[in-house]
Image (cartoon, helix red, strand yellow):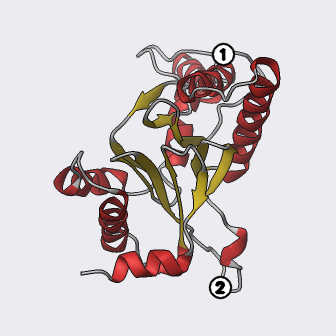
Amino acid sequence: MLESGLINEMMEYDRSNVMFAPEGRLIQVEYAKKTVNQGSITIGFVVKDAVFIVADKRTTKELMLVKGTEKIMQVDEHIGAAMSGLISDGRILIETAQSYAQDHRIMYDTPIDVLSLVKYICSFKQAYTQFGGYRPFGVSLMIAGFDDKPRLFVTEPSGIYFGYKATAIGERDEKVKVLIRKYYKENLDLQEGLKIALKILSKTVEKFSINKVDAIYITDKKQFKKISVKELKKVFSEK
């Protein structure tokens, strides 16, 4: 009976998103983090006067159209976000961010600063780790934007966020981060940074194809810009 009771107690920690395990862990949040690590790899760099994100657009079915698998979405004129993990969760969060950014423009007649948006999304995520009947969002967002300077943040399922000069999320992210630390320099320009990020993707993604890369950048003009496959091929082929 004692053993059975202990097992049931452990299962409660495992199933509940609001109950701490004896070690101080929220097990459901940890499961959500594992979901993020199953997502395709996404890389972000802050470079001179710009910030960019490149992401591998994994297709799981042979006849699936690559065009319908965008990993990066526009949040505001000067902000974009990429998702890794449960994409449906990511879309809900990005739509929430879009709505919040629009409300800010209407109320204050100015674009929202990137950090305020990140904090709002993280508060939204954290609430789903605190109330019963919910589950944590199984997705991390990489948010890139330009207000007074280029900014890059990653939000985690727990509701915490970190700012970066360069980072990666998704499968084999630790291997990718080793390569980022090796090649990244703060004085890179946009073209140089893109070339390095694409080179890292090609080394770490199985069956890499430039046609399956989603990429955006934002400069000091504060405009979200998609990078075409043609432009990516040109950068990737440069010596």
Q: Which one is in front, 91 or 218?
A: 218
Q: Indicate whether 14 appears above or below 144.
A: above
Helix, strand or loop status at disc 2? loop
Q: Label 1 neighbourhood size at 10 Å, few (<14), some (14-19), many (20+)? A: some
| Direction from residue 12 to residue 49 in the image, left or right | left
Looking at this rendering, what residue extends furthest in the left direction? 182
Give coordinates of residue 64: x percent, y percent: 71, 80
User: Which residue is rendered at x = 73% and y = 70% of the image?
Assistant: 68
Q: Amino acid at mark 2?
A: Glu
Give coordinates of residue 13: x percent, y percent: 58, 22
Q: Which one is in front, 217 or 142?
A: 217
**Residue under pointer 1:** 130
Whichever of callouts 1 and 2 sits on the residue coming sooner in the sequence is 2
Q: Quadrant of residue 216?
A: bottom right
Give coordinates of residue 112: x percent, y percent: 65, 27
Q: Looking at the image, can residue 207 be seen?
A: no
Q: Quadrant of residue 222?
A: top right
**Residue under pointer 2:** 62
Q: Label 2 neighbourhood size at 10 Å, few (<14), some (14-19), many (20+)? A: few
User: Which residue is rendered at x = 45% and y = 13% of the image?
Assistant: 22
User: Which residue is rendered at x = 66% and y = 76% of the image?
Assistant: 66
Measure how far apart labels 1 and 2 are at the Cα level.
Answer: 40 Å
Q: Amino acid at mark 1?
A: Gln
Number of numbered discs = 2
Helix, strand or loop status at disc 1? loop
In the drawing, what numbered circle is on residue 69? none
Q: Looking at the image, can residue 76 be seen?
A: yes
Q: Indicate whether 156 appears above or below 5.
A: below
